[in-house]
Image: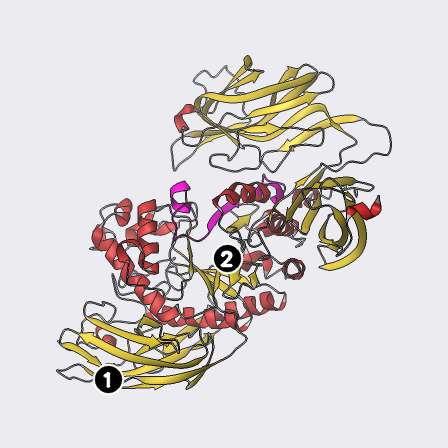
Amino acid sequence: MYLLLAAALTLPFGPLAQAETPFADHEKLALRSVTSNLQTVPRYHKLDLTLDLRANYANPFDPEEIAVTAQFTSPQGKTVTVDGFLYQEYVRHLEGRNETLEPTARPVWKVRFAPDTVGVWKYRIAARDRTGTVRLPARTFRVIPSRNPGFIRRSRRNPHVFAFDGEKPYFAVGENMGWGGSRGTYDYEDWLSALGKAGGNWIRVWMNTWNTGLEWMQDIKDKWSTGWYHGLGVYNLANAWKLDKILDLAESHGIYTMLTFGTYGEFTTGGFFGEGQWPHNPYNAANGGPCARPEDFWTNPTARKLYRRRLRYIVARYGYRTGIQAWEFWNEANPPAFWVGEMAQFLKGTGAFQGHILDPYRHLITNTYGNDAIWKIPEVDFTQTHHYGTGDIADHAPVVASDARHFFGYDKPHLMAEFGIDWRDTDRKYDPEGHGVNMHNGMWAAMATGDTGTAMLWWWDNYVHPLHLYAPFTSARRFADTVPWTSGVWKPLAVDPARVLSGPETFTDLTLPVNSGWGKNNFSEFTITPQGLAGSATLPQYLYSPGKADLRTTPTFHVRFTHPGRFIVRVNEVSTFARIRFLLDGRPVREIALAAAPSSDPNVKPEYEKTEQNKQYGNWVAQYHKDYGIEVPAGEHAITLDNVEGDWASLERITLTGYRSSRYPQMNLYALSNGRQAILWAQNALHNWKNVAEKKPIPAISGAETVVHGLPDGRYRIEWWDTWRGEVTGHQTAVCQGHALPLSLPDIPTDVAAHILPESGVIARAER
C-alpha cells in the first residue's frame, strides 16, 4: 500500500490536506534529485540537502521500511555516514498569548551534515524501501574556514573540563530552560536574548510531552502534553520543527544546549506536581505497548528497539549542530547501568554496535542520575547531580563544593545541572526582591571547586526572567573567560581557614547547617575546627535506620573543646519512629526515642509539635524542631550519631557551645590550581539568601588572612575581583615559600574572587 504520511496521521495542529503528499503513487522506489542549501559551506556549518524521493512505506520513521543514508568523503578520504529524516516545514503565529504552528508545505526527506575539514568534499545519497535500493550520482561541495570552534568535547589536557575541537575552553555558564509556556518558542526568544546578552552560554531543554517530545499516545491530550501525538514509533513533526526553532534561537545568541530526551514522570503515577504519566505512556501495555510495568522499559527488547529508533531520528535531524553541548538520556530517571551502556554504545558505535557509528559528531553523553557503575561507563562523558532543599538550606555554596569534590574522583567533567532553594516552589518565594544570593553563591562555588560549569538554577521562567536576574551570569562569565581551563589539570588546593589576629580571643557557640539533602551522604567522618567544618564535606541532613541500608551512614564528628561544652542536634522531622544514639569516643552516652504516630493514650502529651500522615506512602511524619544534646569534656573527642531503629530523622543544625574562636571568621574558602596559577573564592558565610531575606545584619569580614598551599615557590600577582560586577578591584603581590602563599584578604561584605598569577622571572629566593 502506498501510504502518504499526511493522510494517515493527524498532525499536532490539525490534519494536513490529503493532497499534500510526500510522494506520488509509484510502484517503484524513485530518488530523482537533491537540492542543496549551499555549494560553499563554512566549516562546521549546516549543509542541508532536500530530496525528491518517492518510496513505498507505511511508517516513514521505521528504518526497516524506509531508510535514507548519505556517505560523505572528506578531502583526506575519510568517510562519514549519516541518516536522512522526514521533515515538515511550519510557520508559527502568536494568537494572544498562545503559539500555534501551521504546516506550509508537504513533508520532504532531508539530510543534514556539518563538515569538519576545509576542502572539497564528495557525497552520495542512497534510499532503500521494501522494493529495493536506489542511489544518486556523487556530488561535491567546497568547505571554507569559519570562526565556529566546532563541537564540545572532554578536554584532552584536563579531563575535568569541556573544550572545543581545538582545545579552546568551554566553561558552561547558564541555567535550565526546560520548556516554554503557552507562548512556546516566543518565550524562548525572550529568555535566550536576555541570557545571551548577559554572557550566558548554556541551557538545558527537555524533549517532554508538553514541549518538544516526539512520541506519545495517539489522540491523548492531558495537562502534560501539547497537541496530538500518533502512538509508538511515529513522531510529532510539529514538535520536531519547534525544537529546531529553539536550537536556532540558542545558537544565534551563542548559547549551547544540553538536550534531554525524557523525564522520570513518564514512568510514574501521581507525584507532587501530578506529573506521573505512566497511564498515558504509549509503552504501557494497557495502551497497547510492550511494557506491563514501568521497569520493563529497561529490559523489554521491543521497547529498547523503539528507543534506539527514536535516537536514530534525533541524531539524523539535530546531530549536525555544534550548538548541542550534550545528549542527556533522562531527567531524574534511574535507568540501570546496562541500559545506559547499551544506548551510549549505540550512539557511539562501540560494544555490540561496533562498526556503525550513529552519531559521527561524537556529542557528549550523560544522564541526570547515576551510580558508580554508570559513571564508569567509558561512553558516558560526564557526571551530573541535582540538588534542592525545602527552604531549609540557607546556602548552597557548601553543598555545591562538597558535590564537586566528591565527583572529582571520576576524572570526568561534572555539572550540578539543577539546584534551587526548594524543589516544590520557585526561588522567588524566598527571594521576591530578586537579590539572587543563592544563585550567585552556587555559581561561584562550582567554579572554584572543580566543576566544568556554574551550578545551574532551575527556576528560569518564574524567577530569573521576570526579576531580570541576569547580572550573575555576566560576572561569572567574565571571570571564567580569564581562566585557561585547558592548560593542564586544575585540582583543588588546600587553603588554611581565614584568621583575624587583632583583638582578644573569645569563644561563642558554633552552629553548623546540615544541608546535604535526601540520599546517602558522601562522607561519614567530619572534623570540626574552631572556625567550622573542615574541608568541603557537607553534614548529613538525614539519619537513616538500618531499614534504609542503602542510604544509611553513621556520622562521626572529631572535635576539640578548649573547655567543657555541649554537642547539640536540632531534630527537624521524624518519619514513623527514630531512636537516635549518641556515642562519645565509641561509648553510648544517650539515647532518644522519637515517635511520629499519634499516641493511643490521650493522656500522653506528644513530644513533637505536630504530625500528619503522608498520603502517598502512608507513614506518619512529625515535626519536632527540638534540641537534643550531650555534655562533652574539654579535649579531643569523637562523637557519633546513630539512628538504630525505625525509619529516619532529619536534622536542622548542629551546635557546639563555646566552640567558635573569634580568631576565625565565618568564611568559606575554595581554590583550584593547574600547578602554575590558581583561582580562589572567599565567601562571607553569613551572606546567604536566608540572612538577606530576614534582613539580618551581615558584618563585613575585615583584616583576615589565609595561606594557600601547593603552588610553586615564587612571587605572585593577585587580582581581586568583585564577583557581583565582574570587575577587577585591586591587586597585591605575595611570595610563596615552601609552597605556602600567604594572602591578606580584602574586606569581604559578601564574597570576592582572586586570580593568582606568577610574576615571570621572579622567584622566592630573590626576596631573601
- Where's residue 279, x and y in %? 29, 51
Residue 360 vertical position relative to residue 665 in the rendered view, above or below? below
Which label belongs to residue 19?
1
At 22% from the left and 47% from the top, the residue drawn is 292
Quadrant that contains the N terminus: bottom left
Q: Closest to the observer: 344 or 24?
A: 344
**Amino acid type indicated by mark 2:** Arg
Residue drawn at the location 64% of the way across and 51% of the way down: 444
Q: Quadrant of residue 107?
A: bottom left
Q: Give the structural element (helix, strand or loop) at label 1.
A: loop
> As rendered, which of 450 and 212 lies closer to the eye?
450
x and y percentages locating residue 560 in the rendered image:
68, 21
For marks 1 and 2, give the CA distance: 54 Å
**Which of pointers 1 and 2 indicates the residue nearer the eye?**
2
Pinpoint residue 577: horizontal percent, then vertical percent: 45, 23
Residue 376 among magenta residues: yes
Residue 722 percent across, percent down from the top left: 74, 55
Residue visible at 38% across and 38% down?
616
User: Is the residue marked by circle 1 packed among few (<14), some (14-19), or many (20+) residues within 10 Å?
Assistant: few
Mark 2 residue crowding within 10 angstroms, few (<14) / some (14–19) / many (20+): some
Residue stretch rendered in magenta on the structure: 372-399
Give above or below for 211 relative to 768.
below
Residue named by callout 2: 156
- Rendering quarter of residue 71: bottom left
Q: Is residue 389 visible?
A: no
Where disc 2 sits, the SS reads loop
Q: Is residue 656 visible?
A: yes
Q: Are marks 1 and 2 in contact (CB under 8 Å)?
A: no
Name the amino acid type tagged 1. Answer: Ala
The front one of 687 and 521 is 521
Residue lying furthest right in this view? 503
